[in-house]
Amino acid sequence: MMRRIQSKALLASFSLAAVAGSVIAAAIIYAPEIKPVERPLPTSFDPGEVAKGAQLASIGDCIVCHTADGGRPFAGARALPTPFGTLYSDNITPDEKTGIGNWSFAAFRRAMVNGVARDGSHLYPALPYEHFTHVDDADLRAIYAFLMTRQPVEQVQPKNDLLPGLGFRPLLAGWKLLFLHEGPSTRDPARSAEWNRGKYLVEGLGHCGGCHTPRNILGGEERSSDLSGGIAEGWIAPALDKSNPSADRWDEASLFDYLTTGIAGGHSAAGGPMGPVAEGLSTVNDADVQAIAVYIASRMKPESALQKAASTVATLPRDVASQDPASSKSTIAHPATDTLFAGACGGCHMPGAPMQVTGRPPLSAVSDLRMTNPRNAIQAVLQGVAPPSGRGPAMPGFADILTDQQIADLLGYARAHFTDASPWPDLTAEVSAIRKEDAR
Amino acid sequence: MTVSLIVNGQRRTVSATPDTPLLYVLRDDLELNAAKYGCGLGQCGACTVHLDGKAVFSCLTPIGATQERQVTTLEGLGTQAQPGILQQAFIDEQAAQCGYCIAGMIMRAQSLLDRNPAPSDAEIRRHMQPNLCRCGTHHRIIRAIKRASAVLGSQNGKGDAS
Ligand code: FES
Ligand code: FES
């Protein structure tokens, strides 16, 4: 009985909230169409502005989401899996029929900062307007100039495949009311111009928080946990603040190397969705990437520790080369696994292996092996690591070679052998679960 | 250790240290020489065979991990006298230059046709990505795969999918 009353009361308050909500919502749902314009001539844009826009578009990594596998650049139609279903990215080439060819700057600006398309429909937050809303108009103009001078491609994206009800775009107005906080990113006058530039790029175009900030159940970023780590395409996007277990081993220089090359001496190689990010940043001017590195480094540790970082990197907790595998605690804890490791992993990851000679990080330096959560280590073994451009570290996936139990044994062994961290619990079950996820 | 596995439908028992690559066992102990050693690092695909029906790099597959599992090599697809459909297609298209990559290429392609007998060009290209050919016969290799796919299609059309 109690239950019934409660649920009735709940129902009543729900409907009240719904009515109130829809009145407020109606006011914000409506966005007028912005009149189509004739496609601006490519020659009408200043080449300097276009070049600046190209750099900014690389920082924003527009091309990754807006290009299908093997498709024409910026022509959209890339499938973007989300917890709410699959979205297909829009064509942002200046094609007048299927792209943004007849979008004025005002229309482009509104899409970026308010998440509303030219025709007035609300855009899904897969377009990270939570971040782009902080980009200033001069930069938006440059990106517009860059996009409008690309090759127009006529291509319509497939229909989105979302959970029932979510195809109804006016709902997005409510979402924005909760999670879209418009306005410029705030400056800290006490910090250097470089640090502030980094903050502006990280919070705005770079949209780092899109992956590295946890999201709530409605898919909004938890602003109070900014950059404390999230999840992206089945990989953990590690925390970029002090809570990162490897935070003390990163500094400005190693972050700069990592961001521009996907690899940093004595550190990890970029895996999963971070690969394309590093590839994009490799084409960006050094000053901007350096600014990003400065800002992230400051988030990972207090100022005083910055100088010390370099020396910490030099003394890794375990030096693989000097270790005799036969007598190590890992071999004692996992007696049968050292031969499995030698056969499946040793060709690249043993001391003296060609990969190490060419400066690839030893497993003792790899952050994934030190994380509290084994997810990324498991993904790296299952899927491998593929450099997006075909250059850089390439690790084959072992999903079809090794069983869940074997992968769990290997990771348990590697964690014991190459780090001082405590063993991961329930590894086999974790491997099975992530393998199932990957198969979907 | 002693490992018992099924190779091309036959049970084989070998004795090897568990870290020995499957590739070495196939070539040195079982005299199945189709799979080639290219890099030993999972970067070229010359050593590709099937493990439980999936294409894998045999150079990175420790024999200790293959206990009671099914391995198929190029020799398992057909013989010189009676080549398999995909093998015949590679012959018809003259898809080999030096031939070093071809055993791996065929095994990689076979794993695709086994699960999708009518792949699109894009699917073929994506699937064949891990395997390298230093001679540059890629266009013929792709033609051979499409030829085999067409033969499979016409067989299925006749209701003879054996
Ligand atoms: S020899 Fe196995 S991938 Fe090159
Ligand atoms: S035919 Fe020579 S490597 Fe492919």
Image (spheres, rainbow, N blue to C red):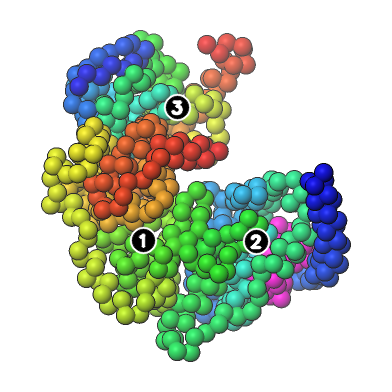
Q: Residues within 10 Å of mark 2 (few under 14, many from 20)?
A: some
A152 on left or right of A289: right
Distance (Cα) linking label 1 and label 3: 41 Å
Q: Position of residue B122 (x, y in %)?
A: 53, 40
Could you tell me the amino acid type at mark 2? Pro
The residue indicated by pointer 2 is A125
Q: Nearer the viewer, residue A78 or B62?
A: B62
The residue indicated by pointer 1 is A245
Q: Is residue A369 visible?
A: yes
The dot on residue A41 is none
- Secondary-structure class at tag 1: loop
User: Which residue is at 69% across, 51% downward?
Assistant: A156
Q: Position of residue A35 (x, y in %)?
A: 80, 71
Assign the magenta stretch its main secondary structure: loop
Q: Nearer the viewer, residue A383 or A109?
A: A383
The residue indicated by pointer 3 is B111
Q: Chain of mark 3?
A: B
Could you tell me the amino acid type at mark 3? Ser
Query: Which contiguous range is marked in magenta?
Result: A96-123
Marks 3, 2 in one chain: no
Q: Chain of mark 2?
A: A
Give the mark toward the camera: 1 or 2.
Answer: 1
